[in-house]
Image: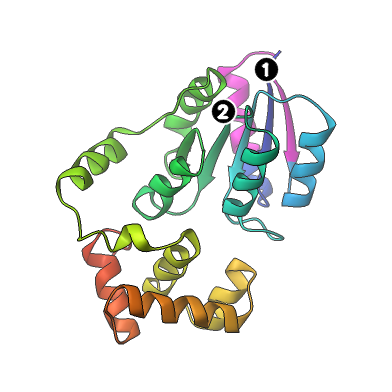
Amino acid sequence: MIRILIADDHPVVRRGVRQTLAEEFAGCEVAEAETAGELISLVRSGVWSVVILDLSLPDRNGLDVLKELQVDYPDLPVVILSMHPEDQFAVRMLRAGASAYITKESASEELAQAVRLAIAHRKYISPELSERLALEAVLEDGGKSQMLSDREMQVLCLVAEGKTLTEISEILILSVKTVSTYRARLLEKLDAKTNADLVHYAISHGYARI
């Protein structure tokens, strides 16, 4: 019996994912969680084949949840389902232990394959991401992006989207002071002076779109 746990705060998304899974995995059992708290509680209550995790849960950041699951349930495959493009977070999620990173735009085409590989304890990497990884192996940016922590990368991408410190603090569930500290670290590590410099860096290195 394949048992799949979906964590996403949007009912429409959960419904679409459930329908896709039902078509591909006949007889599978599917449970849903709207928050990280509900997800952790359900994980503790039974044995699951795979977790499908949204990065933007209302009570906790999905990256933190992924890391917690990796520590407490290292054999539980996690497929990230996100609204953010692959070029922003996919590599970091895979390095953090995710079995796959799927955007919600491509979920209908890629989700079933990603889940199938995850259950087999293999990673799913889309052709586009594979090409990006190959390119990064050849063209490094002097190692600057590798110096950034996961939080710093999240803040960088959100700054590039035009978000204010207050908006970023709400999205990441952090204090404005903490977000300001991350921004200061970004300016130092990337040899930048202004937000415009950060935006330029993010766009020129593929972490944000024009």
* Residue 180 shows in this picture: yes
Task: Report how far apart the C-alphas of labels 2 and 1 lie in the structure.
Answer: 14 Å
Q: Quick one: SS at disc 1?
A: loop
- Tell me what residue is drawn at x 41 percent, y 75 percent: 159
Location of the N terminus by quadrant is top right
- Tell me what residue is drawn at x 32 percent, y 63 percent: 208
Q: Is residue 126 above or below residue 192?
A: above
Give how far across and how far down residue 133 sits, in percent: 26, 41
Q: Which badge, 2 or 1, comes first in the chain's sequence?
A: 1
Residue pointed to by mark 1 = 2
Region in magenta: 15-32
Q: Is residue 200 left or right of residue 26?
A: left
Residue 168 image-quadrant placement: bottom right
Give how far across and how far down residue 15 sits, in percent: 65, 38
Q: Local crowd at mark 2 within 10 Å, few (<14), some, or many (≥20)?
A: some
The one of 131 and 143 positioned closer to us in this rendering: 143
